Amino acid sequence: MNQLLQDYKEQIQDWLSDLHFSKSHKRALLIVGLLAVVISVGVVFRGHSQPVEIALPLPAMVAPPLVTVDVAGGVNTPGVYELPVSSRVIDAITAAGGVKKGSDVSDVNLARIIKDGEQIYVQPALTSFSGGSTSARVAIKRTGPININRATISEFDSLPGVGPVIAARIVAYRKVNGPFTGVEDLQKVSGIGVAKFADLKSKISV
């Protein structure tokens, strides 16, 4: 190593002696050259690169899709609500403030997954003749068509040609599949054919 530095020194001295510079100029040039060598060596041994930090992309926050349902009847706060997809009927009723005291949910499938645009109807408490409220079903004489999404077994049973067995099938079908979208859907219930539906069509609604 010492021999190598000595060789460099002699080469520099020979080069300087060939230059037509004054002694002070040669000395300054030598100092500049030595500084350049020292800096170059320092850069090589020390390294010049810095670690590069790669910013990982943040996961995109995707809002869960929503469905809109109308909760009506015997709930504390009836209205239209938006709920996450795959919510169940009990979630919609809870969003509407829960069931009112005395209301009847026996005809409602609380575990059913709700559908966008449907109405969930809870049978409210019925008012007795004495002015109090009761959840017991009473026979009510109707003058217009019954709503097949709200009617009870006894109300279906009052229709011509519909006995208690078919009335129970209608309510059971509604529990499993949700509200009827049209009166024609009543034909999907076992026991209601074209002829029977023709007799019922003017007496039912949705």
Image (tube, grey):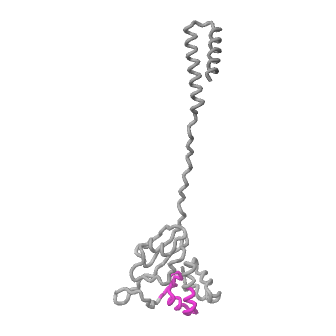
User: Residue visible at 38% across and 88% down?
Assistant: 128
What residue is at 57 percent from the left and 92 percent from the top? Answer: 165
Image x and y of residue 12, in percent: 63, 14
Q: State the image quarter where residue 123 is shown.
A: bottom left
Give, as a single range, the part of the protein colored magenta.
142-170
Is 24 positioned to the left or the right of 194 in the image? left
Location of the C terminus (image quadrant): bottom right
Residue 77 falls in image quadrant:
bottom left
Q: Position of residue 163 (x, y in %)?
A: 56, 93
42 relative to 137 in the view: left or right: right
Classify 81 as above or below 162.
above
- Frontmost residue, 134 versus 199: 134
In front of the other: 85 or 30: 30
Q: Nearer the viewer, residue 46 or 139?
A: 46
Question: Whole-percent x and y of residue 17?
Answer: 63, 8
What count of labels does the image hold? 0
Identify which residue, 138 or 21, lies in the foreground.
21
- In the rendered image, residue 143, in percent from the top left (x then y), is placed at 48, 87
